[in-house]
Amino acid sequence: MFLRVTLILQTLALFAAPITAGLLLSVPNGRTLHSVSAYTVFTVAIVHVIAAILVWRPGGGSPRPILYAVVFLGLTLAQIALGIAGVKTVHVPLGVLMFGMSLLQLSRTPRKEHSPSHDSFSPAEPA
């Protein structure tokens, strides 16, 4: 559940980024708002890596969500660097790609993490 909540926050933060980018172009405080949005995505990406590790480690599940989270954090760092450098021709499409990736990962994440102790089928115990 923790991983899913983190992915929801990540997707919402990514959804807010282009809104603040529009404000960047139209209001005096737009740069500050977009910067806050970018660093929110960065913070949530770090929390996402931590959540993926915490979900994987105790349960012994697949480490694939960790790989995704680390790649996403790398893309976030690249996105921030491109934004600071003003390379909009790559910054904007990368932001769209990241939002799509986040939605896809969210759709693939189960609503509840599997816990072996809570299986729906358990053999009957002898009386």
Image (spheres, rainbow, N blue to C red):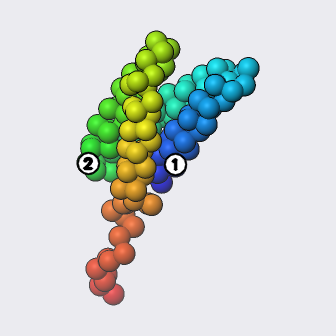
| Image point (55%, 27%), residue name | 38
Q: x, y (%) of residue 10?
A: 50, 41
User: Which quadrant: the C terminus?
Assistant: bottom left
Instruction: Please say if the residues under marks 2 and 1 sit with CB atoms less than 8 Å apart.
Output: no
For the residue carrying disc 1, how many other residues have a C-alpha within 10 Å: few (<14), some (14-19), or many (20+)? some
For marks 2 and 1, give the CA distance: 20 Å
Residue situated in front as seen by the camera: 54 or 10: 10
* Numbered badge on residue 62: 2
User: What SS does tag 2 mark?
Assistant: loop
Say which residue appears at 62% left-offset and 32% top-offset. Answer: 22
Give the quadrant of residue 74: top left
Q: Earlier in the sequence, mark 2 or mark 1?
A: 1
Q: Does residue 6 sit above or below 41 in this rendering?
A: below
Q: Residue 49 location, x and y as percent?
A: 40, 35
Residue 83 placement (x, y as % from top left)? 48, 19
**In the picture provided, is 49 more to the left or to the right than 15?**
left
**Is residue 28 visible in the rendered structure shown here?**
yes
Residue found farthest to the top? 85
Which one is closest to the eye, mark 2 or mark 1? Answer: 1
**Can you see residue 73?**
no
Identity, as a three-letter code, of the amino acid under mark 2: Ser
List the residue tagged with mark 1: 8
- Judge the density around disc 2: few (<14), some (14-19), many (≥20) Cα neighbours within 10 Å: few
